[in-house]
Image (spheres, rainbow, N blue to C red):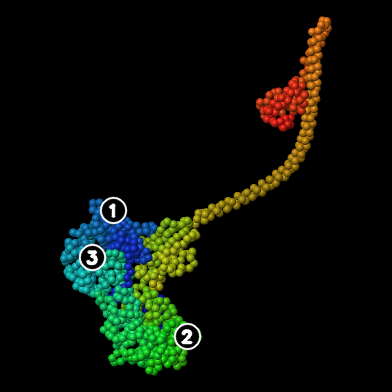
Amino acid sequence: MVFFSNKLSVYLVLILLCFGVKGISGQVKNNGLPKINNFTKTDYDGGTQNWQIDQDTIGNIYFANNNGLLQFDGNSWQLYKIPNSSNIRSVKYDRTNGRIYVGGYNQFGYFESNLKGKLVFKSLLPLIDSTESKPTDFIWKIHIFNDEVIFQAFHKAYIFKDNEIKTLEAPKRFQFSFLVDNNLYFQDIEYGVFEYVKGALIALKGTEVLKNTEIWSILKMPNNTLLFTLLEKGLYTYQNEIVKPWNTEANEFVKKNSTLGGITINNTSLVFNTVLDGIIICNMDGKIKQHINLDKGLQNNTILSSFIDSNSNLWLGLDNGITHVSINSPFTYFGSSQNLSTVYGTVIYKGYLYVATNQGLFYRLLNNTFSDDSFKLVEGTTAQTWNIQVIGDDLVCANNRGAMLIKNNKVAKVLDNIGYYGFKEIPDQRNLIIGSNYGGFSIFEKTKTGLVYKNQIGDFDKASNIFEHDGNFLWLKRDNLLYQMEISEDYKEFNSIETITKFNDTVSAINSLQRINNEVYFQTNNHFYSYSKGQDRFFEDRKLSNYFKDVATINNLIEDARGNLWYVFDESLGVLMKNKNRDYTNIIKPFSNLTGNLVPNYLSINAKDNKNIFIGLIDGLAHYDTTVSNRISVPRAVIRSFIYEKDTIMQGNPQQSSFNIKIPYKSNNIKFTFSSPEYNREPILYSYKLDPFDKEWSLWTKNAMKEYTNLVENDYQMHVRVKNSYNNVSDPTLFKFRIYPPWYRHYLAYICYSLFIIVSIYFISLWMKLKIRKDKYYETLEHRKRYLEKEAKIISEQYKLEKEIEDLNRDKLQTRILAKDKELVSNSLQVVKKNKILNGIIDKLKKLETSEISPETKLQLHSLKKSVLKEINADKSWKDLEKHIKNVHFDFLKRLQDKYENITPRELDLSTYLLINMSTKEIAEVMNISKGGVELARYRLRKKLGLSRKDNLTGFLMNI
């Protein structure tokens, strides 16, 4: 039965079971180098030195950096400063309350999350009693011991408990302090090592010999032994009150390179930091298993601190930078630092590991010492080397310069000078070997003196590294074609060569050619076929095909010496591990980190045993040890920040609290950033979904940020998940927030709208009723108006008629008045004429009186003159005329006088006479002036009235 597990734990158990060995977590390999990731000062934008390291429960890593506190979440770096001292020497995370305690120069305290999730610093200096001296040095170590937090400086230690600070004075001067298995030790520079017990220092007997030394770490060893690491004097053990040198390989290395402390790895291995030559990792007996320095991938040889994280991997704080070392991995690597490049084949021969590369054939002892772990070039092979194989007792190299026999790590003999791809045994002819070379194929023969070249086969000049012989035919796959070739009995020529493009009418592609269980198979789309010579046709092996039914389409496959089937799909590696019941278990995840690093068309797998599986890569060689368990943890997704407008809510910090985020509508452009505490620098992919905005999860992406713009008001939930390089998918993490509607869409606004509509309907209804009543009223008024208009029209017409009659009467009256005026003037003129005559008579009577007449006659003449005079004086007709004219034309005279204020009474009289159309002669008589006087008066009147000669004076006066 074939079993394909989806559970990571099952995978690991099956891997171990198939090799019959239990893995030990944290076991450090001694073959190859673990994967090393360096972080430079530019990467984290902080200071060069990193003194201490710690990790919180979320997975964030913290570094005491000389520019502040560094935080790394797997995706981004944050640098936090402390007041008055940017240089931090110590950091410690408190799992009980989530605080991050730090110590710097003349400053110590802790960081904790504020209401928005951001880390803020709180100094503990104000808690120091005023009678105590303030710290005047670095805080070098921080310990959380029982219910106390202890900050250690050189001259004293500060003990923080119950929000109070107490001090612990050094006997002379502290060097450093160390917490080992819940025991706290202080080194005093003068008196040795002390143990801190219930607030007091108790000297460890026998440690006074360590005075005037610098202990940089105290490590737990088996059998109740402590290991002291001294800066310049090496490693010393302490047991039964005796201090003595730890005479081991590790000690010799440390004394030579000076140590800056170290740590233990799961009580199975030790890490020692050095000043001059990187780090070493040794077992508990002091035998060095790994040496990692500048030449092997570190960016600096001075290691200030080391730390084992929650995934049992190693962090190094350097004098210049930070390094992550993946020691908790079944994989280690041989690369350029060991002189390897692209690897095409490997073989183990007489205790040596030989590697065929693009630069030649290299070798080293399989179990080499840490001081001599580089590969050396086999002299004479400096060229493209396609393969290295053991044939019989001979080591044969397929090189660009020919088929070479290797002995004593040198080229002993060149068997054939043409370039070779590789060699295969011919079934049933164990003494014959067929080789694929640049000119086709050749035959080699095993003899008592060794392998010898025999002959080239025919004139077929096509060849590649993919060929097999099934005992009847030689099969070659090249350029997506399959060649079937029958070799003559003397192996000197081909009897037949057939080119095959498809197995049958339904299967056309040919993906791979391989030997499985000593039988040649042809694979296409994960279906495996074998050839029957008797029936001259291909038959599918359904059992073998069934093993690959749930596997991605493979393009290359080889069987190792243990019967495991290694295959390549989409530039990734997988294996069907053969079980004891002869079934297979499919394993993919442990090899995910090799994706894209395999050599195309040259799958090189060398499985010596369960501890030594070598895999060729484009940049070196991977060593896979199944006995080292790889705790492939399920990744964790963290929504690192939520940004809106000018505000930021931080997530993923200690003391993280739930947030009830409510943001105004104007801030509906938001941004999320993500992270995952994965530190191998393998690709981390993110997928997200914003409910209810997104209907589906997004595609997997490397981008750890997502923005949304113009979100409408709603309650939202942001879901984020991550997938690591092993295709493990995290549980989704959730972030809730609400966007309020704009004021005009707020529920209160809708209530107002509803009230407004109700009130509007009410008032509209009321207005309609009033309008109807008003319309009826206006209709009544309109009828009344129309009636009144008709009545008014009748009255108006009647009035007009009366007016016309009145105007006619007035015109008639005016005409009559003018006529009467004319008549009156005429009569008055007659009177004037009469008076003139009478005056003439008086003049004549006066003349007669002077003549000589009788007194009686005089008397009679005098009496007659008096009578005439009386008649003249008694005649008032002219004055009556003037009065009449002024009364009749009073309005005219007033308008004329108002308009022309400087007009004289004589000119008013003249104007009146002109108005009633009197002639010049009549005016002259009335005014008792000559006609010339009348014309002169008319001229003066024209001038006052502003008229020219052409203007009609009488018509002008009539229009006033």
Which numbered disc flags the more N-terminal residue, 1 or 2? 1
* Label 3 sits on residue: 216
Q: Which amino acid type is shown beneath numbered disc 3?
A: Trp
Q: Residue 736 vs residue 180: left or right?
A: right
Which numbered disc flags the more N-terminal residue, 3 or 2? 3
Residue 404 vs 594, above or below: the answer is below
* Label 2 sits on residue: 502
* Label 1 sits on residue: 126
Q: Which amino acid type is shown beneath numbered disc 1?
A: Pro
Q: Secondary structure at mark 3?
A: strand
Cα separation between marks 1 and 3 = 30 Å
Q: Residue 831, image x and y in percent?
A: 80, 19
User: Does residue 446 show up?
Assistant: yes
Q: Secondary structure at mark 2?
A: loop
The local crowd at label 2, few if under 14, some if 14 to 19, many if 20 or more residues have their Cα within 10 Å, is: some
Residue 942 vs 38, above or below: the answer is above
| Label 1–label 2 contact, CB within 8 A | no
Cα separation between marks 3 and 2 = 70 Å
